[in-house]
Amino acid sequence: MTALDTKVLRDARRMLPQLTATALVMACGIAVFVGMRATMRSLDAACETYYAAERFADAFTHLERAPEAVAETLREMPGVELLETRIVADVRLDMPRIPEPALGRVISLPDHGTAVVNGVRLRSGRLPTPGRYDEVLASEAFATAHGLRPGDTLDAVIKGKRQTLRMVGTGISPEYTYALGPASIFPDDLRFGVLWMRREGLAAAYEMTGAFNDVVALVARGASIRDVLHRLDLALAEYGGVGAIERADQPSAFFVANELEQLATLALAFPILFLAVASFLVHMVIGRLLATQREQIAALKAFGYRDIEIGLHYAKLLALVVTIGSLLGILVGSLLGVHLMRLYSQYFRFPHMPFVLGLPETLIAVGATGVAVALGAWASIRRSVRMAPAEALRPESPPIYRPALLERIGLDRVVPPAARIVLREIERKPLRAALTVAGIAMAAALTVANSFTFDSVQRLLVVEFGLSRLDDLELTLIEPRALSTLSDFRHLPGVLHAEPLRTVPVRLRAGHRSRSVTLEGWQQHATLRALIDARLSPVAMPRDGLVLSRKLAEILAVAEGDSLEVEILEGKRRNVTVPISRVVETYVGIAAHMELSALSEILGETPAMNAVAVTFDDRRQAAFHKEQRRTPVIAGVSSRAHTLGSARRLLDQQIGTWMTISLSFSLAMAFGVLYNSVRISVAERTRDIAALRVLGFRRNEIAGILFGELALLVVVALPMGLVGGHALAWALVHSPGFDTEQFRLPYVVSMRWDAVAVLTVVAAAAASALAGWRKIGKMDMVAVLKTRD
């Protein structure tokens, strides 16, 4: 070990607190990047491996009914590599663990073997035996939620007929990696499950022998997915096709891809803040170190050390800090990644979800940290090592003192001496003060930006489940029924009020733009459904015309007063032109609404309903569910309370974890900035402190002068940080990962998160001030005063 290497270790030991605080900020930035980036890569790898192994489809379409002979025509289409026809139907499942029925989606398996597209991976038990019409394979999540094991039975209502099914095994499919029931935005494994049954038995139950109502296809490499979708739509239009979609629009695949995009956004945005602060801290620490070692640099030059050797000496000190920060950041990032993968495994169903810390994200994180440190230290090191020995041996030139701003404007007599000292110090070192303010502001901004999702999601839930939907239950019917039968549902036990709903799949066109959506209709004076504008005020349902969500209007590039071509995708398929009456705010999906009578008119049918929204007396809940189990026309039940409850549990766990991590990182950033600021301030003014003590100033009076500067910088930085946090939250809300067709977060940041940000910074300031207080108390005044200027 050379003499300079020994000096590196001694300098590191002497400056251990400052270097540790700096390394901690570096570690936070590296941990966020490594943890999120590695999680994203691990999740993406698990996804791609699973999709490829089970031949996850590129194209999906549903229809009413087509003869199996059409399948050969579909398979011969240009661009189609593999294609499978299926029968898919929703059934009601009466499960003992929940009072209301669960919804089961039954998907046909080939009579022999397994599916060639959207394969099902067996997790326990076996596949249904060919020829056995009562055997099913259940989705693993549904079976686990209900405690089902192979050999258990399920009571199902299939097309109005009660049937007992025997579960012979459990499985998973890439089509339901993120298992969502109809109109759901969060998984609910208790109330939605997937069942796979041999095709012959399912065909017999639904009168689909020799026919199919669902198609999934793999697109050949190099072929245009858009062309394949268009050909499928043309071929299946006469059979009631509701419009083909690509994998990116399939609900499960979309939510997985959206989560990956959000991770990529967060993994880029937040580490930049940490590295910017780390660069500033290095600039402060290395600048102070070089200022105190002018004589040592001169001596080294006198002994023959070259500029590059002295520069590398200080670079080694920084490399030591980067190494410690990187190792700690990689360790914390790995733990963060493992925890995130554990969270994702609760609602993403992959065969394997290992966390893999890859080399690329590690090298990028360490490299970016090294660059940030180099940028922060380059100017100071370059200036010092190029200094001539004779100049370095002289003490640093004292700053040019001149009247401060207060004195120039004549306010010095009304401002206390301690305050004047504080203001003079800030005015004479404006760059350091500005950088300190920027670092504190970034810490506050990070707290606000990381916390806004809690309020945004709460607003989303309030709008979707508190303002737009006011029923207790939505009853889905097996087929449309006349409005005159609404009285049957109103007489169910405990029902207080019931209103009809009608939904129909449509394709909306505006020039070359189009989207397939569900058009929902309800009566104009309905009380259990509401339209909400951007100000969260109720909007009356117009008598005629379409009501579009803001996002759908943006996608189609239309506004109120424009007209859309509406292609009806069920029943009497027809095209009509309908004006847009209103544009409203929604945060889930892309919605279109109409008044029930107007909807029936464009459908060419008498007013009908295929769902019923009801409110009921909670005290008669048991009687209600007992009776509706005996009502075969009810295909499924959606509970607003249960949907909201499952959403809150999932979000509380995910957002709560992220907020805890982010607040810890924000506190580390604020402490790193403030602690280094206090230590350098005390180190630079030791003679002033000693002189004041000799003159009779008490310790708390001196601390008031030193920490007054800190307090003033905090007061200036906090408003900037809060404004910056709101701006960063706004940018995240409008980023691609948070503003999608299926899911959008409103921009909402409550004052409580501003208060949390303030408290975080104040706590870091208090801890830093305490460290400075202890440093002043340990100072040897006589030794300080004997030190040569």
Image (tube, grey):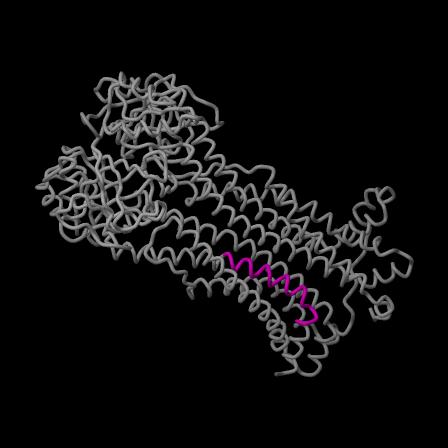
Q: Which residue reaches farthest right? A: 695
Residue 20 highlighted magenta (yes or no): yes
**Between 515 and 65, the one nearer to me in the picture:** 65
The residue at the point 43 percent across, 63 percent down is: 357
- Residue 231 visible in rendering: no
Residue 577 rendering spot, x and y as whole percentages:
26, 23
Number of marks present in the image shown? 0
Does residue 488 lie above or below 459 as drawn? Answer: above
Q: Quadrant of residue 689?
A: bottom right
Q: Which residues are magenta?
A: 12-32
Q: Is residue 754 left or right of residue 645?
A: right
Q: Quadrant of residue 274?
A: bottom right
The residue at the point 74 percent across, 56 percent down is: 770
- Residue 279 visible in rendering: yes
Residue 643 rendering spot, x and y as whole percentages:
40, 36
* Quadrant for the C terminus in the image: bottom right
Q: Main secondary structure of the magenta part?
A: helix
The residue at the point 73 percent across, 59 percent down is: 771
The residue at the point 60 percent across, 37 percent down is: 751
Residue 154 highlighted magenta (yes or no): no
**Between 507 and 391, the one nearer to me in the picture:** 507
Q: Is residue 180 left or right of residue 695?
A: left
Does residue 653 lie above or below 677 as drawn? Answer: above
